[in-house]
Amino acid sequence: MTQQGNRRHSARRTFRGCRRTTKRGPRKEQIHPSRFIKAARPVRKETYTAQHIFEDFALEPLLRKNILKRGFRTPSPIQDQAVPVGLAGGDIIGIADTGTGKTVAFALPVINRLLKDQNARVLIMAPTRELAQQILDEFKVMMQGMYIPTAILIGGASMRPQLRDLSRNARIVIGTPGRIKDHLERKSLRLQNFTMVVLDEVDRMLDMGFVNDMRTILAQMPQKKQAFFFSATMDPKVRALIETFSQNPTMISVKTGDTSDYVEQNIVIYATPQDRIKKLHDVLAKNRKSKIIIFDKTKRSVDRLSKMLCDRGFRSDAIHGNKTQVQRQRALNKFKKNYIDVLVATDVAARGIDVPDVTHVINYSIPQSYADYVHRIGRAGRAGKSGSALTFISQQEHNVA
């Protein structure tokens, strides 16, 4: 082959290689605007009578003291039913709505076992960095006065402190599947001696494409271990994962209805980009005393919209995947503590963020899928509280539909 022919052949090969490795996102689902319009219809809850009070649970003295100091008296339904099973060493499948106290339901049995058995260790997996951090914060409050080494393994954060904490024989390891797998591959984390595992929001992790990572991680743990699986749904994918990695689990379901049942849903039709921002301004101005999450399509558009809102006098900040973990946590804390009223986000914020008093969710751009839409608006329907969701749709999109 001539030199020129070699160059052509190489160019074709390079082009084909680039084409093969081009990353394509999932195809956008066509969602009819009518699916964004729905009246809230909160499920009528039956009065639950707890079978226990927190003092009934067979907890180690310091853990009991910390719980009572926080003012815990009567457990929520998931706590009332799960804690005794967990303390007895049983595997648990917990199906419960968001914001029902699931963290405490698994934290009490886990911490209690760590106190009683110095060889016990737990791995806790969560779908997002934010949820992993929230779990760690909750554990720290309940472990005041105890020395139980911990490590949090999440992306967007420096490896150095994670490696340091793991080298100190961390007995509580909390993280996201991707970063946990990174540490397993580096040999900085070994799971052969872990005696407990917790998977929080299993359905979210499966939705986010972590199924292979989760299976890889769980396969490296001892077959004999105590397992806690918590999920808002129990579809076949969730069931298949749980059945593979648990032994005769106790099913506890306290789910009362879909989160979206508590959210009043409607659309806002706009004609031009200028009309769109004007209508958003009007909605925010009308709800100045509310706590609002706005979802937009890209990281760049999120930053741009947040700045525009700040320029218009609204207290706003942005959160997305390109932000460092420190930046994301700072924005989230400002939102929780009411230093800002508006959080502009990509879909990263739709999963695992526990801000119970969000009143409104605004879809400034149409979500990629209806499942993403449900996750988004669920931020305003937590723990049985009512909320509102507005989806912005262009006149053209509305006419085509």
Image (cartoon, rainbow, N blue to C red):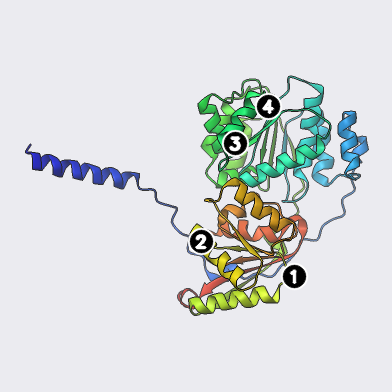
Residue type at numbered disc 1: Lys
Circle nearer the N terminus (1, 3): 3
Residue type at numbered disc 3: Leu
Q: Which residue is mark 1?
A: 289
- Residue 225 vertical position relative to residue 290 in the rendered view, above or below: above
Residue shown at the point (52%, 68%) measured from the top left: 32
Given residues 236 and 161, the one toward you in this image is: 161
Disc ID at residue 241 = 3
Residue shown at the point (77%, 26%) measured from the top left: 114
Q: Which residue is mark 4?
A: 170
Q: Residues within 10 Å of mark 4 (few under 14, many from 20)?
A: many
Residue type at numbered disc 2: Lys
- Residue 198 vertical position relative to residue 324 in the rendered view, above or below: above
Q: Is residue 86 left or right of residue 231?
A: right
Q: Is residue 213 left or right of residue 90?
A: left
Name which quarter of the figure residue 282 lies in: bottom right
Image coords of residue 12 (percent x, y)? 20, 45
Image coords of residue 6 (percent x, y)? 12, 39
Q: CA distance from mark 3 to mark 2?
A: 31 Å
Name which quarter of the figure residue 374 lies in: bottom right
Q: Which residue is mark 2?
A: 297
Mark in the foreground, 3 or 4: 4
